[in-house]
Amino acid sequence: MGKLAKRVAIVTGGARGMGAATARLLVAEGAHVIIADLLEAEGTALANELGDSARFVKLDATDEAGWQKLVADTVATQGTIDILVNNAGVVHSARIEDIEKGDFERVLGINVLGPWLGIKAVAKTMTQQGKGSIVNICSTAGLVGMNGVAAYSTSKWALRGLTKNAAMELGHRGVRVNAVFPGGVNTVMGNITQEPVDELAKYYQDQPIRRIGEPEEIARATLFLASDDASYICGAEIYVDGGMTLGTYSHFLPGAPEPIA
């Protein structure tokens, strides 16, 4: 406990799901957490639950002025910003020929423009103090093609590239930028129909860990990258996907033993 003592973190999309799990874990490790989200009721409830170690701020991640105000207010009240977790995101499911231009732009806005604005907003504070950690929550959709989510997949590939560029530009100034790539996660976005976890397992039978992930499992990877445990890690990609991106069991060398079923 206490890996993040006296540190200040901003978690976007922090009101529920992976963001809320991350906010809880960072607070448990000693951080003061700004829960930045549009979901006012849920974000306020979480801040109340976490007490003096958390504060909710309503933020549209695509609003540059909102980012600037958030950073200025945080520095004024807390004195610093040590950690940024770009977790806010949306998914849109549709065939390529059925996606409306506005829907594609909305996904790119929240999933790519938002993290870029966040990095831009905190960069001055973090580089002036010569330390900081930025964690971008990507997706396995940014590693492989995924059917029916072209806008989402495109945005996560773009966020992956942004992570690499930010790591190169900010790393030599003391700011580490890394990315976490969740697979299926049992959240409102990852389990839209809210099926029981046991029922969800049927969708994960082709991966080594044959179940959906839990938000806390993603949060632990984020904590690692945010903490000094990852002090020499910059521009890295951590896959928290149950082995999803390893491919199916049909891909093995001729003559090799069959995997255990």
Image (cartoon, rainbow, N blue to C red):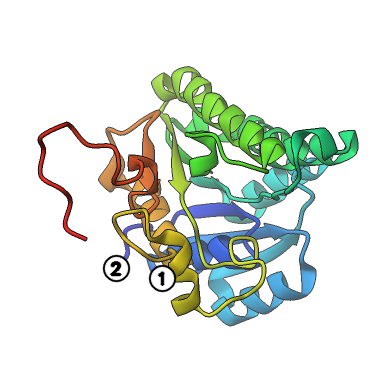
In the rendered image, the residue lying farthest to the front is 255
Residue plotted at (59% across, 54% down): 11
Query: Quadrant location of residue 238?
Result: top left
**Label 2 crowd (10 A; few <14 / some 14-19 / many >=20):** few
Determine the CA span between mark 1 and mark 2: 7 Å
- Picture coordinates of residue 14, whole percent (x, y): 62, 61
In the rendered structure, which amino acid carries the disc numbered 1? Answer: Ala
Name the residue nearer the viewer: 216 or 204: 204
Q: Residue visible at 52% across and 67% down?
A: 186
Q: Label 2 amino acid? A: Met
Q: Is residue 235 above or below residue 191?
A: above
**Earlier residue among tags 1 and 2:** 2
The quadrant of the picture occupied by the N terminus is: bottom left
Q: Position of residue 249 (x, y in %)?
A: 29, 46
Left or right of residue 3, residue 53 in this image: right
Give residue 255's quadrant in the image: top left
Q: Is residue 138 visible?
A: no
Q: Does residue 201 lie above or below 125 as drawn? A: below
Near-viewer residue (122 or 203): 203
Mark 2 lies on a secondary structure that is loop
- On the image, the x and y values in percent for residue 227 come to 35, 49
Residue that badge 2 annotates: 1
State the SS at label 1. helix
Check the image and report above or below for 10 versus 27: above
Q: Are marks 1 and 2 in contact (CB under 8 Å)?
A: yes
Check residue 28 in the rendering and tell me which mark sits there, or answer none: 1
Q: Nearer the viewer, residue 153 or 163?
A: 153
Rendered image: mark on residue 103: none
